[in-house]
Image (cartoon, helix red, strand yellow):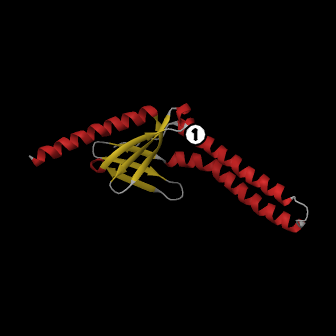
Amino acid sequence: MELKKLDKKVLKLWYIHAGIMSLVLLGIFTITFIILNIPGVPDDVKHAVLLGVGILVALLLVFALIMPALRYKMYAWGYDDKRIVVKQGVIFRQRVVIPICQIQDLHSAQGPIMMMLKLSVVTISTVGSNFSISTLTTDEAERMINDLERHLETRIEELKNEEI
């Protein structure tokens, strides 16, 4: 089985999410700054809190801006008639293998930004858990669900024939 990389639009989506998170972090820093400028707060406390919050926000911003590229580089996925394989993770690497015979439900979902970029998330439900294949193009997601559905139908027919 050949593992595929994600479409470049996924990286764009992840950077949009990182941008939104960055705006929230900057908002937290701004609110902290405004609260600390209330009269009566000692200057030492202001400087210490702003320095602490500023360092934390700066680290989180760097993390938010670097992680999408690293996640994109490390993510690979693929499937055949027996299993689905996903490799992911930057700090903690993970390889997930889902046997097709254990799949109970297949779902695809889109948010508003994902709809604009024509991307979908595929969620695979098994008896024990749910697993999402991170953002695929809508065409890939539909093709995957249709292929897996055919494999499942074939497997069900094989099981019915074994019982007879």
Q: Position of residue 38 (x, y in %)?
A: 87, 59
User: Left of 9 or right of it: where is 149?
Assistant: left
**Identity of the residue drawn at 71% across and 46% down:** 23
Residue at the spot 36% in from the left edge and 38% down from the top edge: 145
Q: Position of residue 42 (x, y in %)?
A: 89, 67
In front here: 135 or 1?
135
- Residue 143 in which image quadrant: top left
Front residue of this view, candidates 99 and 106: 106
Say which quarter of the image contains residue 94. Answer: bottom left
At x 53%, y 54%, the residue is 90
Q: Considering the numbered disc 1 on the image, is that residue within a helix, a strand or a loop?
A: helix
Q: Is residue 35 above or below residue 108?
A: below
Three-letter amino acid code at the position of disc 1: Leu
Which residue occupies the foreground of this view, 109 or 44? Answer: 109
x 48%, y 57%: residue: 93
User: Is 141 left or right of 32, judged from the image as shown?
Assistant: left
Q: How many marks?
A: 1
Q: Is residue 144 left or right of residue 151?
A: right
Badge 1: how crowded within 10 Å, few (<14), some, or many (20+)?
Answer: some
- The residue beneath circle 1 is 13
Tell whether 101 sits left or right of 61: left
Picture coordinates of residue 35 (x, y %)?
82, 58
Furthest residue toward left: 164
How far across and how far down the image is residue 100, in percent?
30, 47
Q: Residue furthest front?
A: 39
For the N terminus, the quadrant is top left
